[in-house]
Amino acid sequence: MSWLSRLFSKWLPKESSNWQWFYRLGSPRWFYQRSGQWLPWVSLAALLVLATGLVWGLAFAPEDARQGNSFRIIYIHVPAAFLAQSGYFIMAIAGAIGLIWKMKISYMVMKAAAPIGAALTFIALFTGAVWGKPTWGAYWVWDARITSMLILLFLYAGVMALQYAYHSVDAASKASAILALVGTVNIPIINKSVDWWYTLHQPATIKLTSAPSMHMDMFMPLLVMIVGFYLFYAVALILHTRNEILRRERKTSWVRELATAKAGS
Amino acid sequence: MSQAPLLSVENLAFERDDSCLFSGVNFSVDPGDVLQIEGANGSGKTTLLRMLTGSLQPSAGNISYLGQALSACRYDYLSDMLYIGHQPAVKLNLSAEENLRWMVATSAQSNDVSVKDALTQVGLAGYTDLPCYALSAGQHRRVALARLLISEARLWYLDEPFTSIDKQGVAFLQSCLQQHVAKGGAVILSTHQDLSLTGLRRYKLVSDVEAIA
Amino acid sequence: MTSHVARKMDSGFAAWLRRDLLLAYRRRGEVASPVIFFIMVSTLIPLGLTPEAAELEKVAAGMIWVMALLATLLSMDALFASDYQDGSLEQMLITPQLLPLPILGKVTAHWLTTGLPLTLVSPVLGLMMSLPNAGYVPLVCSLALGTACLSLVGAVGAALTVSLRKGGLLLSLLVMPLYMPVIIFGTATVSYAVDGLNWLPPLAILGAMFAASVALCPLAAAGALRVTASN
């Protein structure tokens, strides 16, 4: 990997003033302290946005003409599926940063991102099944997007399994970072193949290129929910990463001081 | 005229998972040197040698070859280096000759000593066509050591080369090393054997774990 | 100088290819097992499903592909394992050649000793599963390209798990999701032909996947080996 880091290090002037934040971000201690300050605000924002989106979506958005109230599960299903996909990319990018700039903290972020992403994928699959029963009359249909989601869950499972298979933290981090990158290259191929393989589902509801086919009154709460899920994801990621920092840095003096301070107070 | 040493190591440290194996390793090797790395079991001799071959990254410090950092001259350095590790890299289903041919084919520089001659010199004359599973551990090591006779590399890294070799073999290997340094090569090896070689220096590796305890 | 470098790079590929083929020849029995597995499992399908030709015909392409995939997966584990144990992998990592080339040599040897035999046996299995006549040529073509993809992608998984004691099962977990596009287009090639459609487009996509895997997989495997083999 050294050639990779050499390639990229050219783009980063070493320790020059503009980039200091980047190098400081690499310090687990700095991240821990800073994220402690961010956490209440992000959590509050996540709570507010999620509450707004939920109430709006579940109580005020109009009923679907064909599906009735059962369509409302979309407000959980779609954001979860959204985040499950982006979560994989976030994980892979964190892994890539670790491989290239040898930043410890990004490996911790990568490790923290895997179970969160897997949980969101599971939520997407579960809500999809619940939604499927009244809509198609079956809990499980081999539809393109559901199948892609299932494969995504397998990809997450692979990264997590590799992470836990190694005793050495270094080897675990680097190996799963490589796997996450390989998976990232493959996700578009898998999605396209599966799409091509079968299309039974209704066409993708939100496309960035065309106007939403949903009614605005239904679409706005969904947008709010997606933003809310992003915020919630950020909170979960920060919490998980902080845990991982404490676990990996438990021998350092600053964590010990923190522990004694907590015990004393 | 002061010339950069063939290989120099400055402040080398190795740490894995936040525990430090060794640190502050300094030495340099010039043509004609034999450096014997000594140290208790677990002091990191193998790790140090593998770091010199570039397969492990040091967590701190520099290794330089002819005054250049390894990353700047990787191809030249690897072409000028030969490493024989703990495992002799001998395939049991291949004969001694096939094994050696493959080893020579994958190494960068070789002289005109033929594979057969090399195997005869290491005392495997009648065994060249037998599959290696029929040979003993000592003979496996001899197959690997036969590479030394064919190699043109100046830097030799040998990890416990005397393991499972008989007295004759030890004497042969010593003479082989002696010839290599006489020609201007250098050897870094880890062994507990007492060697009688001109140009021999010793480096005592103390692991940080030991030093604390 | 450049010619010298080029010659050496080439020898990295050829030397490993030649050695692995020779090794495979010495262990013919072991090398034959994926093929035997392939044939044996395909006798299970009529037993478990139905012996009726009309039913078998429908699932033939998919079943043959799934079994070829499993047979490849079985053999993948061994790609780097013995080299890791006897120290030759360590030697591979310190050769001055570009690491992807020896890896490509090994993967080529792997394909020649598993993917190619599977491909050659597949028409017989097609016969046993009453595959319609139009399906044979596409089956062989798609398996030839597809198993090469499987070997290449599997090499990345094998590299990631080489130093783990129970790497084989984990390897399947890591690699199987990555195999799905290959199986989709592999079976599509055959079923297009059986349905009387032009089967070249899905085969071309398999070809594209193969090209991408040749370019990327050895690089990823090289990166993975540098991480895992030094542990």
Image (cartoon, rainbow, N blue to C red):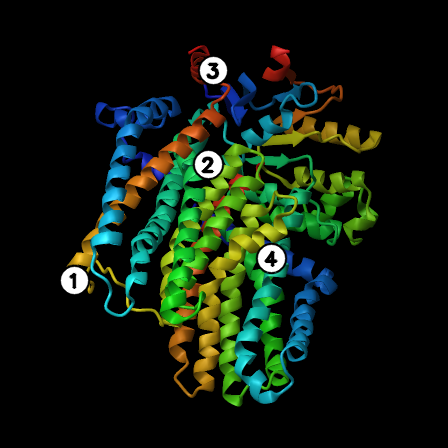
Tell me if I can see residue C72 in this picture: yes
Which circle's residue, 3 or 1, is located before the other in the chain?
Answer: 1
Which of these two is toward me, B148 or A119? A119
The answer to whether marks 4 and 3 mark residues whose Cβ atoms lie closer than 8 Å is: no
Q: Element under label 2?
A: helix
Res C107 → quadrant = bottom right
Question: Dot 2, crowdedness within 10 Å: few (<14), some or many (≥20)?
Answer: some
Q: Disc 3: which chain? A: A
**Residue at left 62%, top 48%?**
C167
Q: Position of residue A4 (x, y in %)?
A: 39, 40
Question: Dot 3, crowdedness within 10 Å: few (<14), some or many (≥20)?
Answer: some
Which residue corresponds to mark 1? A211
Q: Does A115 sit above or below residue A238?
A: below
Q: Amino acid at mark 1?
A: Ala
Gap in Å between the C-alphas at discs 4 and 1?
47 Å
Instruction: Give the number of the disc on residue A36.
Output: none
Whether discs 3 and 2 lie on one chain: the answer is no
Instruction: Give the number of the disc on residue C76.
Output: 4
Q: Disc 2: which chain? A: B
The answer to whether marks 3 and 1 mark residues whose Cβ atoms lie closer than 8 Å is: no
Gap in Å between the C-alphas at discs 3 and 2?
42 Å
Instruction: Give the number of the disc on residue A256.
Output: 3
Which residue corresponds to mark 2? B74
**Residue at left 29%, top 61%?**
A69
Gap in Å between the C-alphas at discs 1 and 2?
54 Å
Is B126 displayed left or right of A259 in the figure? right
Q: Amino acid at mark 3?
A: Arg
Q: Amino acid at mark 2?
A: Arg
Q: Between tags 4 and 2, which lies in front?
A: 4
